[in-house]
Image (spheres, rainbow, N blue to C red):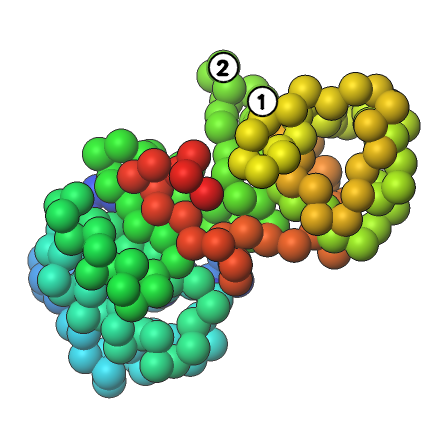
Amino acid sequence: MHIVIMGSSIFGFNLASMLVTEGHDVSIIEQNEAKCNDVAHKLDTVVILGDGTNRDTLEESNIDEADVFVAATENDETNLMACLLVKKFNVPKIISQVSKSDHRDAFQEIGINIMINPELYAAKYIERLIVRPNISDITVLGKGEAELIDIKLGNGKHVGKTVKEVNENKKFNIVALFEDSEIVFPKQDTILEKGDKISILVKSHMATDVLASFNDDSIETEIFPGIKVDLYNPKRS
């Protein structure tokens, strides 16, 4: 996955560091030369000295091949301008840091996929939303040992089965269904249908394999490219 991050603030740097560790192709755009050199020494990734609101700089980052663009500067206006320009490159997922809540409407107007208040949401949360695109929300439980993941069923082997049958896999458990955005605790004989939104409880170290099995089932995503999630209040989705 090719990810372009504009800005090497604490949030941007931490996010880039985690994505690089995961083995993703990351390009960082930073217009402050000192910060640019510092990041280049700390991370094994491409760091471009330039302005992310400049088309030439974006093209240098191979934005036309990007799967995700993250505007991570601490200036909302700069982030908004960059996102507007990036939309012209048809990047599938655009994420922006938004520092002031009264600026959210402007980002929503141009159709930004995800907005982040970094004071409320850790980079790790955003990293999981990026690398696991077939989910609509994650809640990390305990000290990170388990995750509660919301997904939406498409056509696949789980459709038509009962909750009891699916839960016998011993890798995850269906703990809730959503009906008209309301949580319903499923009975063991509840039959899963295409389009059902479910919550599964899975141990973190098994989450990648579990989600891969759901990918084979053609699960639809709610944040990519469907419903947009405002991370000031992710439960609105």
Residue 152 vertical position relative to residue 205 in the rendered view, above or below: below
Residue 169, horizontal then vertical, whole percent? 85, 28
Q: Nearer the viewer, residue 223 or 192?
A: 192
- Where 195 sits versus 165, above or below? below
Q: Identify residue for label 2.
A: 142
Q: Which residue is mark 1?
A: 146
Where residue 198 appears, x then y in whole percent? 66, 35
Q: Secondary structure at mark 1?
A: strand
In three-dimensional space, the C-alpha distance between marks 2 and 1, rounded to whole angstroms, equals 7 Å
Image position of 31 with respect to 178: above or below: below
Q: Secondary structure at mark 2?
A: loop
Q: Is residue 201 left or right of residue 213?
A: left
Can you tell which quarter of the image residue 124 is in? top left
Out of 203 and 226, give the one closest to the viewer. 226
**Left or right for 213, reference 233:** right
Furthest-bottom residue in this view: 56
Tell me: 164 left or right of 64.
Answer: right
Tell me if label 2 and label 1 are in contact, CB under 8 Å: yes
Identity, as a three-letter code, of the amino acid under mark 2:
Gly
Please tell me which residue is depicted at 53% across the width and 44% down the height of the picture. Answer: 136
Viewer-proximal residue, 119 or 35? 119
Dot 1 amino acid type:
Ala
